[in-house]
């Protein structure tokens, strides 16, 4: 197996191969053709006259297609080849592969090309946990196509392989007998089709065209259109343009088509998280609002369609709750995993309300707010009736079954909610940032009730509830000794006193009293939390601190973008600019693509940010982070029908300009000049 | 399977479900939903449920549909009683869905509304 992999994706399909374009997937590796959380090809190997091919070069043309230039032979030494092979592959509803073989000799020749194909139909969860299959695979040749299939009771999935050139099909692949004239060429187009997971019969489900809606040109045109409709950025700090472009392209690549409503929303990340996630899709859409507001519209409508309707302990579902994660694979279908959908997050419901209000503020989309009134009211009801499980006025979480998530906040690893001495807190936990989101959700929903739903009584009640929550929170969560908010209140009613980045989210939400906010800002910018590359998830010096612990000391770009927005909200503009700039400088070490997280080592210790070893890249809310930081630096805020611009740039940036920002004002421009501005 | 081989209790439960659905009249949570859903309960019953901005009507006679749900009577009973999740059933093919799935999902809401 080659060390390097080539990944392409489009819509709900992604393909991971070796540098020759071959797929030879070990069961626990993410090589293969994947769609809807299922591996539809685990083997796809090209040979000529029984010989493997070696790679001369390859081109990742863009995120949805790749090109491989090959010659026969395996050797490490290049022996004069007299045959050129090119594979060009485009993803989408499976993939389309164009094969071209050219005879470089001046004599005619006859070749046998062979494409071996097999599919194990592994669920991504099975790949992740190296589990074995419970059903049977089958292969057959029918109507000029190779059908690779899998059946377990009524669960049937098929991969269909067809070719434009004459071939001999058998159950393990296809063979082409090719005659080439001197310097002659041969071509074939091979289509691999995958089904739509929610259509029951293969005939219906495998009907889509592979390689994007109309193959070839469509994804390229679509990406062009996406980039063309995005605002135009220019800046005297050179890396900014690259980071911005990278964010836009990665968000384009991560667009997931939920099917249930029109349009695309941000999937959480490649390769493990190509699906709808409540928290990730909502926060990424929020980050991207000034740049690609259509993501927010689709996210809100899709999450509304999937809103919880009943109490279901297996799924941690309750009426009005917004989902955590939706999956389509076999284990979900057979309820061996609860993801159909799974509702184990305590923050996605308030975040849904926050994004609904924020989207209207930017886009003026009145119909959206009116259409989703019922769902928004159900979400508000969930907060009171289900989110607050013990009636203490705070939203807390505890999974109802062992298959659920232990921590249902954004720091969702099992050991993230610790006391200052490093000991574990008890469930149920009410983490501080969720109370902030609830406060903000109520304030915003009050505006919606008054302005759009013609319900001033509800608006009054929500405002009273929000004010009451704020007063109690500033008393109950405050740690006078540490001059900080507690990370959480745990199942024993104790304040979980570790110093963490969560306090920054309280500024974003507006729940912190000004005095308390000032103390939090001092912590956020202090040596314990601020590493120089950004704000750590947990402060250095805490008992549980670990600079390479997932949520125990690493720096998360999306976390920092929310904190920068919070600092901006409270008027700490210089601090917001410093946080934003630290992360943007870190991005320059990753070729403009921010990772999900990087190590929390002090900046003067490592001189470059050390990536956290994670397989997920790009990650949607890391890709969205620079966008929210741009918003914070320029101080972009919709006020009525206008966009307010009030910039505060870091010292490294002299000027920053964004043209054609979409919104209720149609398009408008924003310009900021720094203190050290050069003309 | 013909109706005569079905247990009377199954037929009654299906009848009762549609009667209860028809009696809902207006479902506020579906105020912004319009469309027709066909239930094809193999060997037992076929019904058409039309939602018009929250107003719910159940028909015994065919009308043009936006979404069809096809399953056997046992699966149908398990879904309406809350034992079987509709989405998981659709994913594994024990309920077959044709057309606009979002409309199918709204049904869970119509059925559950008020029971939460």
Image (tube, coloured by chain):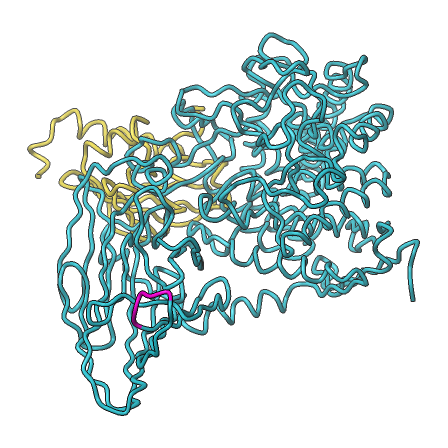
Chain colours: A cyan, B yellow
Residue A543 occupies quadrant: top right
Left or right: where A306 falls relative to A224: left
Quadrant in the picture for the C terminus of chain A: bottom right
Query: Taking A666 as reference, is A452 above or below it?
Result: above
Q: Nearer the viewer, residue A361 or A416?
A: A416
| Residue at (29, 47) in percent of width and height | B97
Q: Nearer the viewer, residue A28 or A12?
A: A28
Q: Nearer the viewer, residue A433 or A322?
A: A433
Q: Nearer the viewer, residue A170 or B113?
A: A170
Q: Position of residue A124 (x, y in %)?
A: 36, 42
Residue A169 occupies quadrant: bottom left
| Residue at (47, 68) in percent of width and height | A59
Query: Taking A600 as reference, is A224 above or below it?
Result: below
Q: How many marks?
A: 0
Identify the residue at the far top of this view: A492
Q: Position of residue A428 (x, y in %)?
A: 55, 15
Query: Taking A514 as reference, is A472 above or below it?
Result: above
Q: Which residues are magenta?
A: A72-76
Q: Position of residue A371 (x, y in %)?
A: 56, 46
Q: Position of residue A236 (x, y in %)?
A: 81, 63
| Residue at (39, 72) in percent of width and height | A69
Left or right: where A306 falls relative to B91: right
Overall secondary structure of the magenta stretch? loop
Q: Is residue A409 magenta?
A: no
Query: Taking A70 as reference, is A262 above or below it?
Result: above
Residue A461 occupies quadrant: top right
């Amino acid at each position: 197996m080659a060390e390097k992999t080539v990944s392409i994706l489009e819509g709900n399909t992604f393909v991971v191969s070796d540098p020759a374009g071959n797929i030879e997937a070990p069961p626990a590796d993410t090589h293969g053709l994947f769609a809807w959380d299922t591996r539809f090809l685990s083997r796809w190997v090209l040979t000529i006259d029984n010989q493997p091919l070696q790679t001369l070069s390859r081109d990742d043309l863009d995120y949805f297609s790749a090109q491989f230039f090959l010659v026969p032979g395996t050797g490490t030494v290049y022996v004069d080849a007299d045959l050129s092979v090119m594979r060009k592959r485009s993803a989408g509803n499976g993939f389309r592969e164009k094969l071209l073989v050219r005879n470089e000799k001046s004599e005619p020749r006859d070749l046998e090309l062979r494409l071996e194909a097999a599919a194990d139909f592994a669920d991504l969860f099975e790949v992740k946990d190296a589990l074995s299959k419970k059903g049977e695979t089958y292969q057959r040749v029918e109507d000029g196509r190779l059908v690779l299939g899998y059946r377990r009771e009524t669960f049937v999935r098929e991969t269909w392989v067809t070719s434009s050139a004459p071939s001999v099909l058998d159950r393990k692949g296809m063979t082409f007998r090719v005659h080439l004239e001197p310097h002659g060429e041969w071509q074939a187009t091979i289509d691999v089709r995958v089904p739509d997971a929610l259509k029951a019969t293969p005939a219906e489900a495998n009907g889509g065209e592979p390689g994007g809606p109309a193959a070839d040109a469509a994804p390229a045109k679509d990406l062009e259109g996406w980039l063309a409709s995005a605002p135009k950025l220019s800046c005297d700090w050179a890396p900014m343009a690259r980071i911005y472009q990278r964010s836009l392209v990665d968000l384009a690549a991560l667009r997931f088509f939920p099917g249930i409503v029109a349009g695309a929303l941000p999937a959480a990340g490649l390769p493990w998280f190509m699906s709808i996630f409540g928290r990730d899709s909502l926060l990424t859409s929020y980050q991207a609002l000034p740049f690609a507001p259509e993501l927010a519209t689709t996210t809100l409508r899709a999450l509304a369609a999937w809103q919880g309707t009943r109490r279901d302990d297996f799924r941690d579902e309750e009426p009005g709750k917004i989902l955590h994660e939706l999956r389509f694979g076999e284990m979900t279908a057979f309820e061996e995993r609860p993801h159909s959908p799974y509702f184990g997050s305590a923050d996605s419901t308030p975040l849904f309300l926050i994004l609904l209000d924020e989207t209207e503020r930017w886009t003026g989309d009145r119909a959206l707010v009116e259409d989703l009134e019922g769902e928004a009211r159900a979400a508000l009801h969930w907060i009171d009736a289900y989110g607050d499980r013990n009636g203490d006025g705070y939203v807390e979480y505890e999974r109802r079954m062992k298959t659920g998530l232990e921590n249902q906040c954004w720091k969702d690893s099992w050991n993230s909610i610790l006391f200052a001495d490093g000991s574990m807190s008890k469930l149920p936990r009410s983490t501080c940032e969720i109370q902030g989101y609830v406060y903000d959700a109520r304030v915003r929903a009050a505006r919606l009730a008054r302005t759009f739903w013609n319900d001033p009584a509800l608006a009054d009640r929500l405002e009273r509830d929000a004010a009451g929550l704020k007063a109690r929170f500033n008393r109950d969560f405050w740690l006078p000794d540490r001059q900080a908010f507690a990370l959480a209140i745990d199942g024993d009613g104790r304040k979980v006193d570790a110093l963490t980045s969560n306090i920054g989210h309280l500024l974003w939400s507006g729940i912190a009293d000004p005095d308390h906010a000032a103390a939090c800002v001092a912590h956020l910018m202090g040596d314990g939390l601020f590493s120089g590359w950004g704000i750590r998830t947990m402060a250095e010096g805490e008992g549980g601190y670990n600079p390479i612990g997932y949520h125990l000391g690493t720096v998360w770009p999306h976390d920092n973008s929310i904190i920068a927005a919070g600092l901006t909200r409270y008027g700490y503009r210089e601090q917001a600019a410093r946080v934003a700039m630290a992360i943007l400088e870190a991005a320059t070490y990753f070729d403009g693509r921010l990772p999900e997280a990087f190590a929390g080592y002090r900046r003067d210790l490592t001189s470059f940010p050390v990536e956290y070893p994670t397989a997920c890249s790009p990650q949607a809310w890391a890709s969205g982070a620079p966008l929210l930081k741009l918003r914070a630096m320029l101080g972009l805020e919709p006020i009525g029908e206008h966009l307010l611009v009030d910039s505060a740039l870091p010292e490294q940036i002299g000027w920053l300009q964004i043209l054609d920002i979409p919104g209720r004002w149609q398009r408008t421009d924003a310009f900021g000049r720094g203190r050290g501005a050069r003309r | 399977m013909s109706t005569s081989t079905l247990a009377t209790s199954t037929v009654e439960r299906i009848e009762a479900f549609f009667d209860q659905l028809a009696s809902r009249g207006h479902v506020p949570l579906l105020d912004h939903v319009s469309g027709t859903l066909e239930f094809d309960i193999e060997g037992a019953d076929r019904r058409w449920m039309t939602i018009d901005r929250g107003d719910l009507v159940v028909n015994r006679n065919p009308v043009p549909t936006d979404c069809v749900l096809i399953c056997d009577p046992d699966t149908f009973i398990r879904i309406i009683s809350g034992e079987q999740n509709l989405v998981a059933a659709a994913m594994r093919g024990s309920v077959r869905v044709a057309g606009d799935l979002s409309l199918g999902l709204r049904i869970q809401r119509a059925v559950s509304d008020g029971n939460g």
